[in-house]
Structure formats: C-alpha cells, structure tokens
Amino acid sequence: MDQKCAIVTGAARGIGLATTKLFLGRGWRVAMVDRDTAELELHSDMDNALLLPLDISIPEDVTRIVDQTLGWSGRIDALINNAGVAEFGPAGDCTFDMWRRVMATNLDGTFLCTQAATAALKETQGSVVNIASISGLRASTLRVAYGTSKAAVIQLTKQHAAELGEHNIRVNCVCPGPVRTKLAMAVHSQDIIDAYHDAIPLNRYGSEQEIAEVITFLASDKASYVTGQIIAADGGFESTGVGLPALRS
C-alpha cells in the first residue's frame, strides 16, 4: 500500500504507453486503461501493471476503473487523462455524431475520470495531468471538433485546479505539438513533415518519450507547487505564432 499508483488512460500505445513505462521504471504501479482490448493485452507481461479494457466515455466504466484500481493498489496518486480521439475534416462536413464522438472521449471522459478519482486523490494529496494539444491553444484547419475539445480540456484543467487545490490536489495540462508517433508518420506526407519542421523552432517532431517526461514530472513531488498550468511540449511551435518560415527565408 506504500507504493504509488497512477491511472493512465489511453495506455496501450503512444504517449500513454511511454508514460506508463516511465512510471513503472520509477517504482510506481500503473493501472493501464484502454478500450482497445487487443492492443492492451499486448502488454500483459508488464510487472506492476493492471490492464483495464474499459471506455472512459461510459460513466459505468469509469466507476469500474477507479474501483478496480483501488481494489488492486489501495490508492491513487496520479490520474493521467491521456485517452483521446481525433476526426479531422472541414467544419461543414462535421456531423453531430462526429462531434459527439470526439467530445465524449476527449472532454466527457476527462471530466468523468477526474470526478471519479477525486476522493482517492484527496487521500494521497495526488495530482491530475490532462493531455490536451497544441490544437487547443491555436486554431487550425480541419479540427473543429478536436481543437474545440482540447481547448475545453485546458479550461477544465483550470477549473479543477481552482477547486481541488484546497484538498492539495494539483491539476495541470500538457499540450503536445507534433509528435513522431507511428500513426503520424503513416499519414503525414513529406510535404507536411517539412512544413512542420519549418514552423517549429527546434526543427523537428517531438518523441513520445519527451512528452511522457513532462507528464511524469508534473505528476511527481518535484512539481509540488505547480498547479493550474498549461505546458506546451511542442518544440516552440505555439510560441512563434505565424510567419516563422517566411522570416527564416
């Protein structure tokens, strides 16, 4: 019961999996949540990990996530709200069903998980780290639902930080920029990759490991006086605004 425990949603791949591995490497236990059962089961050999093939957009599943984690570990020290979905396309083509699918996971799921875990986090004076996106900080084409959901997660972070601080629960948000995931590399053409490199001061995509380092720092005692903060882990992409490629040339 003395071993710290984190819940990581969207833990079967990408940033969630990288975050899980960092926590495990630092002696934490991790409840790995993902609705992709097959992908999640690929990690069944991990020590100190509890696999929970559940859906954060379903309130009853969220209750199970918290109850099963407490039954397994006896405590929750950190909640990492990482699970998310994206459906890109012109605003005029975004149906209400598409809108709701994105909001149900990205926003509703983040709200539901935080609410369900609050009582346990009060006991440990733990922390919440929400994963938004650079798309929640700056508008872009084809992201009307995704970008709006992530902007809402940023505001939700501030609301929870304001209200939960009196219980010594810290709530922060990480906004990744372009990250070199398998999915991104599969769908980004060379022209898109070059354009991102031109627009990012560090001239490259980030890695899943780099984002996970920021997440685990914010969840740790090293960030004990940090709450209500929105951290763009984006190689400087958000800070430059527009026009950087033209200025460089």
Image (tube, helix red, strand yellow):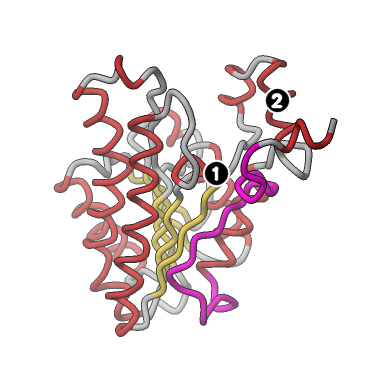
Is 44 or 128 nearer to us in this picture?
A: 128
Q: In the image, is residue 11 above or below residue 214? A: above
- Expressed as whole percent of the image width and height from the top left, the position of residue 238 reads 60, 47
Per the image, label 1 sits on a secondary structure element best described as: helix
Q: In the image, is residue 94 above or below residue 86? A: above
Q: Earlier in the sequence, mark 1 or mark 2?
A: 1
Q: Is residue 229 magenta?
A: yes
Label 1, label 2: how many angstroms apart (C-alpha)? 23 Å
- Expressed as whole percent of the image width and height from the top left, the position of residue 5 reads 43, 66
Q: Quadrant of the C terminus?
A: top right
Farthest right residue in view: 249
Task: Indicate which label's residue lies in the foreground, 1 or 2.
Answer: 2
Q: Is residue 74 magenta?
A: no
Counting labels gives: 2
- Expressed as whole percent of the image width and height from the top left, the position of residue 96 reads 19, 24
Farthest left residue in view: 60
The amino acid pointed to by label 1 is: Ile
The amino acid pointed to by label 2 is: Ala
Highlighted range, magenta? 220-242
Determine the residue positioned at 20% across, 23% down. Answer: 97
Per the image, label 2 sits on a secondary structure element best described as: helix
**Camera sees residue 37:** no
Per the image, the residue denoted by label 2 is: 195
- Expressed as whole percent of the image width and height from the top left, the position of residue 185 reads 64, 23
Determine the residue positioned at 22% across, 31% down. Answer: 100
Per the image, the residue denoted by label 1 is: 15
Q: Residues within 10 Å of mark 2 (few under 14, many from 20)?
A: few
Q: Quadrant of the N terminus?
A: bottom left
Left/right of residue 160 with respect to residue 20 in the rendered view: left
Determine the residue positioned at 62% across, 37% down. Answer: 179
